[in-house]
Amino acid sequence: NAGVTQTPKFQVLKTGQSMTLQCAQDMNHNSMYWYRQDPGMGLRLIYYSASEGTTDKGEVPNGYNVSRLNKREFSLRLESAAPSQTSVYFCASSEVTLPTSYGYTFGSGTRLTVV
Amino acid sequence: GEDVEQSLFLSVREGDSSVINCTYTDSSSTYLYWYKQEPGAGLQLLTYIFSNMDMKQDQRLTVLLNKKDKHLSLRIADTQTGDSAIYFCAESRDTGRRALTFGSGTRLQVQP
């Protein structure tokens, strides 16, 4: 089915470990986004990529890096995980650079726990 | 998101109407959206409204926008147990960062 695919769905890391969250979309969308969701705080933007070859910081970029590998894929890397990065991470894509009536298509999320 | 505010919780009885409210601060908001998140799932776009509209109706959903007060509401008629979820409002701006800003979400609980 067409959509946004995130891997892995669940991950437990030790403090200081690194990992990459993968995201791929097959809708030929130009823009892609990474958000984190914490209880009572809604979704906060980490990084986004308005188009292939560009990336920009969002509200909470510290401790993260991103790569827009090609039009389909946008990965999020934690270089040295900290307990404060325990969260649910969502990747999203949109057909064109916002604003647009289409909004986003979301992946199903990655639940990350850092111990 | 600090620029978009929602109440945290709403409880209604099955068959009643639900009204979820949202306030936003940026007057340059062009599109405003309502998303639904069911447990363990991503967010699903329910509906949207363009900033030059006052109202939009889509089956059981009615969106009202008061641009003067920067207030957005989502009314769900004949609420069903399947409507139990977290509802997020979000705004999209015409300037600056081209990404959605989300509220903290309203958890709707529908009692049978």
Image (tube, coloured by chain):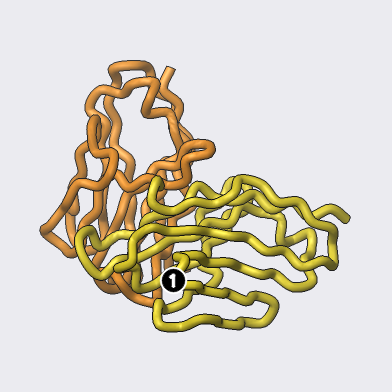
Chain colours: A orange, B yellow
Quarter occupied by residue A54: bottom left
> Where is residue B51, by image quadrant?
bottom left
The chain carrying label 1 is B
Q: Residue B107 location in percent, x, y?
A: 64, 49
* Residue in front for this viewpoint, A101 or B96: B96
Q: Position of residue A78 (x, y in %)?
A: 27, 31
Left or right: where A83 falls relative to B35? left
Side of A65 where B36 appears, left or right: right
Q: Can residue A62 be seen from the camera position used here?
A: yes
Q: Is residue A23 left or right of residue B105?
A: left
- Please state the horizontal and vertical placement of residue B62, each as a whole percent of the image: 62, 76
Does B30 sit above or below residue A5?
A: below
At x 29% / y 37%, what residue is drawn? Answer: A20
Residue situated in front as seen by the camera: B54 or A41? B54
Residue A6 rendering spot, x and y as whole percentages: 40, 49
Q: Quadrant of residue A19?
A: top left
User: How many callouts does the rendering have?
Assistant: 1
Query: Is B6 located above or below residue A103 in the figure?
Result: above
Give me the residue at 79% from left, 56% from top.
B12
Q: Residue A7: tell me if it is visible.
A: no
- Element marked by disc 1: loop
Residue at the far right: name it.
Answer: B112
The residue wearing badge 1 is B68
